[in-house]
Amino acid sequence: MSIIKFKPWAAVTVRDLVSGQDFQHVVPIDDKRDHDFDHECKCDPELQVTEDGAIVFVHTSFDGREYTEALLDLSQVNLN
Ligand SMILES: [Zn+2]
């Protein structure tokens, strides 16, 4: 039996110094490379807008942890 250990993610609020607006960033913790808390991060973060209008940057991990998580999600699908 193997145990797959998830690496964690964090939700961080960052205030833009120019506009004063708050942005949420969802970033992988302990990734292979550091992330910048702006839209120019090298991981090319996905911009999402929540129902209440908050702007969220969802970063992409450099270690590919999303793929493991996606496979585990598929393994939870009940085919019966
Ligand atoms: Zn990033």
Image (tube, helix red, strand yellow):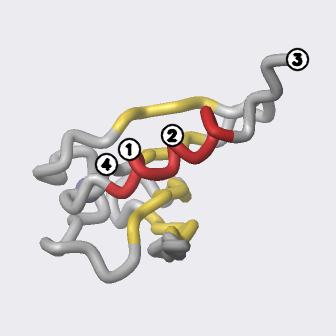
Real-space Cα distance between discs 4 and 2?
A: 13 Å
Q: Nearer the viewer, residue 79 or 53?
A: 79
Give the Cα separation between the discs numbered 2 and 3. Answer: 20 Å
Answer with mark 3 or mark 4, whichever residue precedes in sequence. Answer: 4
Q: Which residue is mark 2?
A: 70
Mark 1 surroundings within 10 Å by alpha-carbon count, few (fewer than 14), some (14 through 19), many (20 or more): few
Per the rendering, the mark at residue 60 is 4
The amino acid pointed to by label 3 is Asn
Pick the quarter of the image with the N terminus.
bottom right
| Amino acid carrying mark 2 in the image | Ala
Residue, disc 3: 80
> Which of label 2 and label 3 is nearer to you?
3
Left or right placement of residue 53 versus residue 37 in this view: right
Tell me the residue at 41%/63% (across/down): 27
Q: Nearer the viewer, mark 3 or mark 4?
A: 3
Instruction: Name which residue lies at 32% across and 82% down.
Output: 30
| Amino acid type of the residue tagged 1 in the rendering | Tyr
What is the C-alpha distance between the residues marked 2 and 1? 5 Å
Q: Earlier in the sequence, mark 4 or mark 2?
A: 4
Does any atom of ligand 1 lie closer than 8 Å to the CB of label 2?
Answer: no
Task: Give the answer, above or below, for where 78 lies relative to 24.
Answer: above
Looking at the picture, how far across and down is residue 46, in whole percent?
Answer: 37, 34
Asked if disc 4 is less than 8 Å from ligand 1, the answer is yes
Mark in the foreground, 4 or 2: 2
Question: Percent from the top left, x then y, of residue 22?
Answer: 55, 58
Q: Which kind of residue does numbered mark 4 sit on? A: Thr
